[in-house]
Amino acid sequence: MKWKQQILGMEAYKPGKPIEEVQREFGLDEVIKLASNENPFGFSPKVKAFLAQDDSHHEIYPDGYAQNLRTVVANFVGVHEEQLIFGNGSDDLIAILTRALLAPGRNTVMATPSFSQYAHNAQIEGAEIREVPLVDGNHDLDGMLAQIDDNTAIVWVCTPNNPTGGIVPAKALQAFLAKVPQDVLVVLDEAYYEYVDNEAHENTVPYLEQYPNIIILRTFSKAYGLAGFRVGYGIAHADVIAQLDPVRAPFNNTVLSHKVAAIAMGDQQFIEECRQKNKAGRAQYIAFCEQHNLHYFESETNFILFNVQADSNVVFQELMKRGFIIRSGAALGLPGYIRVTIGTEAQNAKFLEKLTEVLVAQGVFA
Ligand SMILES: *Cc1c(COP(=O)(O)O)cnc(C)c1O
């Protein structure tokens, strides 16, 4: 068949092993997945109460315009309704953006390591991928600017960055935006926005007034705890949204996901509680790293990337045998490191106990 040349040999995204599979393989009663940055505290109790009594009409197509959810998000974010686009997760929005803007002969600029889907989708569209290495875990914005030319269509800024966890400080981001040509779209992927607690960080929505060439991506999958419902949203200038909308599949969310996301956004108390608990959980990991002199990256997210001074694939395997699924840095472009989703206090404590066991066995700890 006449497959696009550039997809030959491409591999599908490898999600972490499912919990049930690890349970079977290693004969474990309990397996805890700290691999995909899902919310260990679940989702809003208001969503739970709604789902228990919901009798939606699932035989009817969802509202392709997501009117109700659109109103809720527009009010919450403080933009006009025409400034929003909804995706089947922000993964869908990344695909829509690349499909709308990338093609052979064009290029796209991104940091590396960063979120894998930017390069993955760019490859499918046959665009040239220009990856600029992180410096100390941070975006090298000057290096990225130097890569932009007349054929650049999208620049990706992941803030906080997955897998390192740090933000691009507001001042640096503004200086960068001032230098990017106005016909280049800058994507600010803010999947962990709700977790950020740093004075150097600003809400980027007001930047839209000065820079009509940016789109901000946020999601209900992380802090809102609704990864299973698949809802992400993009915030941009109305003209940008109008140009993207025809590229979007007509019914890319579901009847239920629209309702659930709107309810979840209305429960900011839940988000605040998660933010606080996550911060306390992150402190457990930081204390561990400092105690054992393991290098870690400052994180503004619900995950932390740190060095285990051992083969991270082996550490990953050994942790799996002990009931924990995490991500090996080797798979993320940072061998020697592991990326761990911050769990509940009890999960973190148990995890660090198992990790200690593994690192003693590996001869890292005496
Ligand atoms: C998790 C994640 C996404 C994708 O989330 P969706 O579930 O598709 O909304 C996008 N960007 C980053 C950086 C992520 O970590």
Image (spheres, rainbow, N blue to C red):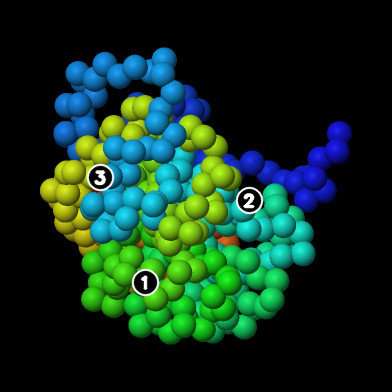
Residue nearest the viewer, comparing 223 with 3: 3
Q: Which residue is mark 3?
A: 72
Q: Which residue is mark 2?
A: 99
Instruction: Quadrant for the C terminus, please.
Output: bottom left
* Sooner in the amino-acid sequence: mark 3 or mark 2: 3
**Tag 2: amino acid:** Arg
Secondary element at image label 1: helix
Label 3: how many Cα within 10 Å (few below 14, some 14–19, many 20+)? some
Using the rendered image of the protein, determine whether residue 172 is visible from the camera's viewpoint: yes
Q: Quadrant location of residue 1?
A: top right
**Number of the label disc, if any, that sits on residue 43:** none
Give the percent coordinates (x, y) of residue 208. 38, 69
Secondary element at image label 3: helix
Q: Which residue is mark 1?
A: 209
Label 1: how many Cα within 10 Å (few below 14, some 14–19, many 20+)? few
Mark 2 vs ligand 1: CB below 8 Å: no
Give the percent coordinates (x, y) of residue 45. 16, 34
**Residue at the image position 29 percent from the left and 32 percent from the top:** 259
Label 2: how many Cα within 10 Å (few below 14, some 14–19, many 20+)? some
Residue nearest the viewer, comparing 98 with 32: 98
* Image label count: 3
Q: Quadrant location of residue 155?
A: bottom right
Give the spatial CA distance, label 1 vs label 3. 21 Å
